[in-house]
Amino acid sequence: MPLDLLSLTLVAKPVTLDEGVKVLERDRYCCRYCGLDGKASFENALVMSVDFVVPRARKGKKDPSNLVACCRPCNMIKGRRVYGSLEEAKAYVLGRRDDLRKAWEEKVRVPARSVSAKADSR
Ligand SMILES: [Zn+2]
């Protein structure tokens, strides 16, 4: 399956290809933070990776229980902060995504309801 091959190359280096694919398959290629479906499109597949819930820098284990499928935007937003649990990290990431979305909407003045509509070309 081409997506698997693609994902193979996108797995974070500290995780072996085998380990990364197992995590992605367990999580059905969906980001555990925002739910982005890595199988829905090529663009989505490109941003899927594997995240250490407890960062390695904080002695997070390279163990399936500490690894989750994660899109790169969520990974970036999550950063290197330490969370008590995946749920806590998820709440933070989703909250930050909301803040960023609001800031972006204000900046480009796109009403929330028309975000999914195709923007007119200017
Ligand atoms: Zn995500």
Image (cartoon, helix red, strand yellow):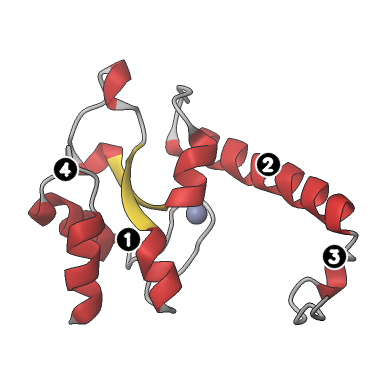
Residue at the spot 23% in from the left edge and 55% down from the top edge:
23
* Residue at mark 1: 27
Residue at the spot 81% in from the left edge and 46% down from the top edge:
103
Mark 2 or mark 3, which is nearer to you? 3
Q: Can residue 87 be seen in this view?
A: no
Sort mark 3 into few (<14), some (14-19) or many (20+) by Cα contacts within 10 Å. Answer: few
Q: Residue furthest front?
A: 122
The percent position of residue 92, horizontal first and vertical second, equals: 60, 36
Sort mark 1 into few (<14), some (14-19) or many (20+) by Cα contacts within 10 Å. Answer: some
16 w.r.t. 82: above or below: below
Disc assigned to residue 112: 3
Label 1 close to label 4 by CB (< 8 Å)? no
- Foreground pick, 13 / 62: 13
Q: Is mark 3 within 8 Å of ligand 1?
A: no
* Residue at mark 2: 95
Q: Residue furthest top?
A: 58
Disc assigned to residue 107: none
* Residue at mark 4: 15
